[in-house]
Structure formats: structure tokens, C-alpha cells
Image: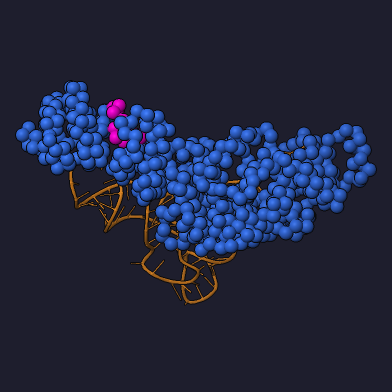
Chain colours: A blue, B orange
Amino acid sequence: MTHNNPSLRVRFAPSPTGYLHVGGARTALFNWLLARNQGGSFILRIEDTDAQRSSKEMTRIILDSMQWLGIDWDEGPYSQAQRVQLHRDKAERLLAEGKAYRCFCSPEQLGEKRKAAERERRAWLYDRTCLGLTLDQVRKQQQAGLASVVRFCVPQTGETTFQDLIQGEIRFENRLIEDFVLLRSDGMPTYHLSVVSDDIDMRISHVIRGADHISNTPKQILLYQALGEPVPQLGHLPLILGQDKKRLSKRHGATAVEHYRAQGILPQALVNYLALLGWSPGDDREVMDTAEIIRRFDLSHVNRANAVFDSAKLEWINAQHIQRMDIQKLTEIVKQWLDDARLLEQAFTKDSTMIKEAVEMLRPRCKTLHDFSRWGRAFFVNDFDIALEGRKKYLSHPAIFPVLGELAQRYEALAEFSLATAEHTLRQLALEKNLKPGDLIGAVRVALTGNSVAPSLFDVIVYLGQQRTVTRLRQAADIS
RNA sequence: GGCGCUAUCGUCUAACGGUUAGGACGCGGCCCUCUCAAGGCUGAAAUACGGGUUCGAUUCCCGUUAGCGCUACCA
């Protein structure tokens, strides 16, 4: 069921330090699904404040991956780096109101204390050395040229709790939260300040993000409260894990959306699979198009436990989408794929009607677009190899070659070349040569397609036509 | 170590106190068949453990265990 809540505003805020990985894509997707289901807005914000690690190129790739997935945004992309003044202003305000304070402790000093605490197996929180500094002392230190950061003054009593949209109630004791840094010594805002500041200014109503942010949440809630702003609704998505149950990362190999695109995964299949990773429609439906997922999406059906990424199931979903897609559409996609693989330029067929025939035959055995070019090469170009496996299985006996030559002869002589005549001719020849029909069919299949695995042979023969069939049979007969 | 979150077949999940614990991927078998798929039928496979609450717990509460996450002047 879709709704119309224009006040619902969600955002996806990737940092452009790498490709869009499936975890990020899933977060983006769930935000987008919520916005589309609720009739709200989906805002894209690039968190590029870490100049060292961020790049324009990565931003471009992330945007490209999102567009490919069909995840479109209503506002943005905003650059967080261009908003630092807004962040600073808020820190200044907190400073003026006594809700934040200057800290002159050096990273070295802090590191010492942290290490000492670790040695004694004590939990370490910033010890508030600089909290008691008078205005005078602060001025003096600054005049002396000492660098300082701005720390948020965290209330030391009570607890911060929130009702997580996905995880339920979560509570933290305030005394276990340290006075975290708002402004670095170079004046740049830190993550907590930036996110809260931007989410406030962008009127974000629902923050849906990975569960790895749960521990950050109380700090951010405290910031909202100190700034006198309402806290948005919060929802934390379970993490996506690798087969080893560790959080999915580059170590697991294929994590970039880009990668799956290159493998021949369809965007709607990846969307479908990712949606099912943590969410279920509540019944047994699994293969869905994006419109149906939008219609049925609902935060209350999001699971709380982490999920292992299973590429076998992704491939199955992809295969399902390939099977069900409109043949005309699929044909265009395969044609584009062949073109990108530089296969189309040497193809004996460039017209969509013939490609369509091949796609129809091939698709029940293709899980990815890549399978079309891998297993279907001989359907598009004349230049293909005979796989060793097929050679061993059906062309190992030398007596088979003259039979292939003979079949070529008879096919060439056929006045009417059709499925019926092609089949009859072949079976007749097998009978005469005392061959099992299956063996001859297998040998011909290898000769015509290069593989021992292919669609129904006589369909293939009709598809290739008399000329190419005869030529390929002769070529195979000659390799003896 | 501290804090937090989580826990149903190998994996993704359904169940919102009462079911022979359902579906899907993967795996095995059968059917179809010129191979391989697709398709159909089918088999094995789960409530982590221990206490409560209740007439009755997968479900609610507590503990144990395990996994994951956070613990920076990164985001």
C-alpha cells in the first residue's frame, strides 16, 4: 500500500571513499523504498568531509551505481564539505551556551592516558581535564598558541533511550558516554556534529542506517536535545555478513555493486535480492519487481538479526528475472551486453528478431547476462572454440568425423530444411551407421555450438539455418 | 576489557501464546528428455542452552553461551 506523507524525509549519506558496496546499497534501498512507499522524499548527501579519503571519482561511481539500480533521489546530491560553516555555527552556539567547552589536551597526552587505562584494564573515557577551565585560562592558552578542540559536555546522570523503529527500545547510561569532540583543532567539524547539523537543516524525519551506528545514536540524540531540535525517528538495519559471519567487506571479494553489474546481474534482481535481505513481505512471495516491492515495503517487517550474503540465491533471483522478463526487453539488454563485450560487431546476426530467437532458446539456462555470451557465443558469432570437454565426450572416436561429413552432405542436399527434415535426416543416418541417435546428436551439438550443453539440437539447427549448419559440420569433420 | 544489539533448517526467512514449526536458495531422489537447464513432484534439514511466567511457549521475562557492532581530533 502506498501513502502520501510529504513530510517524511529520509536520506542516504555515503562517504565517497570507495565503491558503492552492497551494504550501502541496501541502506540506500531501504530508505528509498520507505520514501517511495510513503510518498516522502529521498535525499542524497555526500559525506565528503574527509578530504584525504574522499574523491570526486568515487562520488561519480556511487551515483552511477545508484542510477543503475534505479534508486533516484529527490534532492541533492548535497556536498557535506560545503556545509561546514553551518556545522561550526552550531558548535559555536553550544560553546556560547556552555553546552560545549574548549579542550587543550594534545592527542599525545590523550593517547598516553588511554594506553595507561588499557594496561590497568580500566575503561577509558575522556577525563574532563579541561572542563573546569575558566574563560581567562582558555584565553591565555589560546594566546599562547595552544591548539584546542571543542568538546560536547555530556550530562553525567540519567540515561538516553530511544524507540528504534526496527530494534525496539534501546537504552544507554549517560555516564558511560564521553565528552566527544565536536570541532577538531583545525576547526573542522566531526562526524557527529555534521550529521546532526545536516539532518536538522534538511528536516530529515527518519534516519534509517546500519546497526553499526547504534552506539553513536545516544551522542547524536544528546546533540539534538542540546540544540533544542526534535529527534528524528531512528531505525537501525541489521548488518550484511559474509559467509564467515563477519561483517561484509572488501575481504570477502565481490562487494561492489559495480561488480555484480559486470557479472551480468540485472539491477531489478539485485534490488529484489537486497530487499529480501532483512525484509520480507510477510508471505511467501520472493520474486518481485521493484514496483511490487515499493508497494509492499514496510519497516515493521524488517528483521533484527544480521544476514549472510548468499550469492547463489542472488543468482537464482537473477535467473528468475531473466526467465520472466518481457522477451523484447531482454533481447535489447542482451544485445547491449553483446555489444559491450565486443561480440556484436563480429556477429552474423545483428538484427533484434534473430537475436530474440537465440535469447528465447538460451534463457532457461542463463543465470546471468554473462551466461549469454559464455554459453551462447556460437549463437551470435562464427568464431568459437570447441570445448575440450565436449570434444572428449562426443568426438573422441575417429569414426564420428566421416559421419559428420556425410551429414553435412545430406543437409546440403535437402530441398526443404526444417526441424522435421533435419531431425529425420539425422536419425536416418544414425540408423544406417549403427550409431545411437543420442551419440550423433551429441557430436553434432558439439560441432555446431562448441559445447556439449546447449538448447535442443534441432531448434539450434533451424536457428542457424542450412548454410551455417553445413559449414560448421564440415569444419568439425575436418579437425579429425 | 567496557557498552550495545542479536539468536528458527548450512543460508535467507514465515509464525506477532495453541501450526504435523510454513516457504525459498543450496543439497539428494523421481518425472520430462537428444545434452544441460527450465518446469513438476519429492526427501533430508531448524526453534543455541538453562531457568521462570502461563492450562499452554519459537513467541513474554531473567541468566548462560555464542556471534556481531561501537569503543579516534574516520565517517
Coordinates of residue B32 in the picture (x, y in percent): 19, 50
Q: At 40% from the left edge and 41% from the top edge, which residue is drawn?
A: A333
Q: Height in image: B55 above or below A394?
A: below
- For residue A166, which quarter of the picture? bottom right
Judge from the rendering whether residue A176 lies leftward or rightward of residue A146; answer left or right: left
Magenta span has A374? yes
Q: Height in image: A382 above or below B57?
A: above
Coordinates of residue A210 in the picture (x, y in percent): 59, 49
Judge from the rendering whether residue A349 lies leftward or rightward of residue A287; answer left or right: left
- For residue B22, which quarter of the picture? bottom left
Residue nearest the observer in this picture, A281 or A117: A281
Q: At 94% from the left edge and 43% from the top edge, which residue is drawn?
A: A136
Q: Is residue A57 visible?
A: yes
Magenta span has A189? no
Coordinates of residue A132 in the picture (x, y in percent): 87, 47
Judge from the rendering whether residue A138 lies leftward or rightward of residue A464; answer left or right: right
Task: Report the span colored magenta.
Answer: A373-385
Q: Kindly give the residue lying farthest to the right in the view shown.
A: A136
